[in-house]
């Protein structure tokens, strides 16, 4: 899975940065496993479509829906660059 595009989106969190990423392929239950080393991965299988979210120790918050290529990332106030680079390194 690779990142095809990213753009900053409007946020309502003071001091945070919110991005919309587009991946080269849709999220599946299998490729979600690659996120687990980053932090706490939660899978909500009772939803009509599998919803997932991840929170890393640095404070990065990622969420999306299986079957979609788009996902949302909220970067922390401090350590933003390091958290984003760690995520991108794992997905590239």
Image: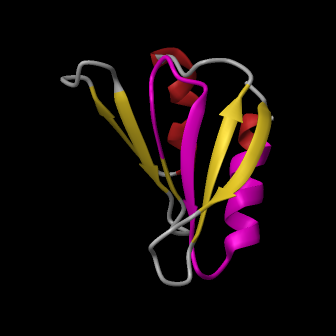
Residue drawn at x 58%, y 80% as measured from the top left? 77
Question: Which residue lies at the image location 74% right of the left edge and 67% below the top edge?
Answer: 82
Chosen colour scheme: secondary structure
Locate residue 14 relative to residue 21 in the image: left or right.
left
The span picked out in magenta is 63-89
Can residue 15 be seen? yes
- Residue 40 appears in the figure: no
Placement of the C terminus among the 4 image quadrants: top right
Decide: is 62 above or below 58.
above
Drawn side of residue 9 relative to residue 57, left or right: right
Residue 28's spot in the image, x, y percent? 51, 17
Report if residue 43 lies within the magenta region: no
Give left or right: position of 55 versus 10. Answer: left
Residue at horizontal 56 percent and vertical 64 percent from the top: 10
**Magenta span contains residue 80:** yes
* Extreme residue toward the left, this view: 46
Query: Could you tell me which quadrant the N terminus lies in?
Result: top right
Q: Position of residue 4 (x, y in %)?
A: 80, 32
* Residue 54: percent from left, percent from top: 45, 48
Which of the 4 image quarters holds residue 43? top left
């Amino acid at each position: 899975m690779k990142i095809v595009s990213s753009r900053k989106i409007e946020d309502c969190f003071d001091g945070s940065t919110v991005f919309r990423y587009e991946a080269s392929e849709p999220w599946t239950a299998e490729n979600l496993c690659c996120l687990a080393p980053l932090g706490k991965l939660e899978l909500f299988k009772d939803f009509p479509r599998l919803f997932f979210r991840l929170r890393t120790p640095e404070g990065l918050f990622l969420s999306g829906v299986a079957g979609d290529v788009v996902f949302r990332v909220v970067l922390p106030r401090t350590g933003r660059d390091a958290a984003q680079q760690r995520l991108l390194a794992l997905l590239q």
